[in-house]
Image (spheres, helix red, strand yellow):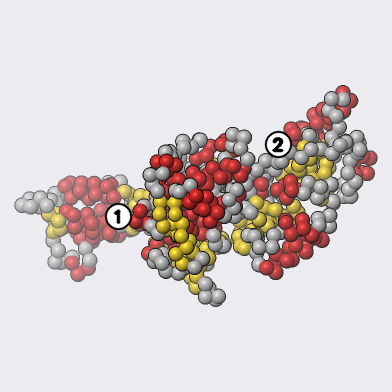
Amino acid sequence: MFAKAFRVKSNTAIKGSDRRKLRADVTAVFPTLGTDQVSELVPGKEELNIVKLYAHRGDAVTVYVSGGNPILFELEKNLYPTVYTLWSYPDLLPTFTTWPLVLEKLVGGADLMLPGLVVPPAGLPQVQKGDLCAIALVGNRAPVAIGVAAMSTTEMLTSGLKGRGFSVLHTYQDHLWRSGDKSSPPSIAPLALDPPDLSEEKGSVQADTALQGDMRRLTLEGEEEEEGEVQQRCGEKSLLEATEDPSVGGLNPDLTDGKTLQEQMDELLQRCFLRALKHRVKKADLPLLTSTLLGSHMFSCCPEGRQLDIKKSSYKKLSKFLQHMQQEQIIQVQELSKGVESIVAVDWKHPRITSFVIPEPSPTSQTIQEGSREQPYHPPDIKSLYCVPASMTLLFQESGHKKGSILEGSEVRTIVINYAKKNDLVDADNKNLVKLDPILCDCILEKGEQHTVMKLPWDSLLNRCLEKLQPAYQVTFPGQEPIVKKGKICPIDITLAQRASNKKVTVVRNLEAYGLDPCSVATILQQRCQASTTVTPAPGTKDILQVQIQGNQIHHLGRLLLEEYRLPRKHIQGLEKAPKPGKKK
């Protein structure tokens, strides 16, 4: 189901009533979970989001996200755990075992065929047709996939382990897994009698035969299902966090060096902190709100391809981390107003700041995801062009152009200059003036001027000509063919709206014209602003999405578009509506 990219419809924080309902549903669907385990899976106060999305085949899926990881998903009113949840509760579902080589086929969209099963000495788990099951690999009980049994255990054995065994819904390494922190399965020791001893010749021969006998079928299943599918927008991105992949959770597999995920996040947190102090924060910025340090400076100092998430560090909270930095005498933090902490002093001569050097990024960490492809984002080259209207065809036809021809400004100037020289229109007494013949008069003069204006300076002539032409533009993305369109390119439009609850929301439209994925922008802003975001169709349009962020978040949005995406300010409108310093959002 998640073998290909999906499209996010909305992403909102869960309501209290929905949280209670989800707990009740989990208790009913998974009765083996105790009360404490249900409370742990569906926390009472921690952040929990509901993400509504469409799978690549159009299935409407609701995903529940906690701590940045998808923990449950709902399809056709049926609730399913993700592999992240099964790693914490490996005995939640009946578990069947297969071979590591089969996993690649499952990730590609294939179902699990019965010849690929490994039968333990204790026998297969007892299930009925339609039961939800987990799939693990030989040597590790941590599930790598979930699926629905295509037949009962009795029918499996009666068939001689032939045919389709499980319809696979979700796997480790699929796009739903990629929307989380991308952690690998933990090592969970197999049960005493599971799997069989692979040193036994009989077991090995049977297993090899079963694997070889159905690997071709597995491959064909996956390939047939992938044919003809169209890649959707907004897929393979974080549901709660930024889409600057390859490690949505902020951890780069190339940089692990044997460190735990928590140690990696601690290292990333300190790196962003030191880089912010050394290269972004100035003395004039002090006192600086700690929330501003994080949202406006530290997040933007995070290396491309990684995502900062304090909750996944050993500190858990920004205040605790800053206390640690204060103990090292790097900064001084004070509560200048009740409940609001600010950095009031920085020791820029501290050895940790002076010795800090920005590490060279690895090639794989310099990518962000766009759809299902990984590529660095570069702003497009946008060039203003001009389209010849019917009223000016006589002026341009001598140079081989006709109505609708698209020209650059320099081409227009050359054509007009050549026209004037060829028709001997340059004033003999003053070379800076051009005499207007009937064609020029009809093309560039207003009705009231045609009997009064006989000559024009070169600059006035050229400017008038450009003004009379219809606007067009060319957009060129790196490595792609230029796209030429008539009219003016719509700027990225940022507005503030007032909702019925008297709360402000920031709305941004037209991101697609600049090659930006609205869903990716929404997830980045959600984390940086610590505010809920939604992506919905823009009113009055068919294929344009708009991003809504709770509160006045124009300051964060401006930093993202101008400083990180390096888009020209002239193509963004609404930045002036950012809240003034000290003003409540």
Return the x and y of residue 264 as percentages of the image width and height.
Answer: 58, 42
Return the x and y of residue 152 as percentages of the image width and height.
Answer: 90, 47
The vertical placement of 293 against 181, above or below, is: below
* Residue 455 vs residue 183, the one in the foreground: 183
Tag shown at residue 104 = 2
Return the x and y of residue 147 as percentages of the image width and height.
Answer: 78, 47
**Left or right: residue 466 compared with residue 158:** left
| Residue at (89% x, 41% y) in the render | 124
Q: Amino acid at mark 1?
A: Thr
Return the x and y of residue 298 as percentages of the image width and height.
Answer: 47, 50
Give the crowd class for mark 1: few <14, some 14-19, many >=20 residues within 10 Å. Answer: some
**Left or right: residue 289 compared with residue 142:** left
* Residue 466 vs residue 584, the one in the foreground: 584
- Nearer the camera: disc 1 or disc 2: 2
Can you see residue 491?
no
The residue beneath circle 1 is 393
* Residue 214 vs residue 528, the one in the foreground: 528
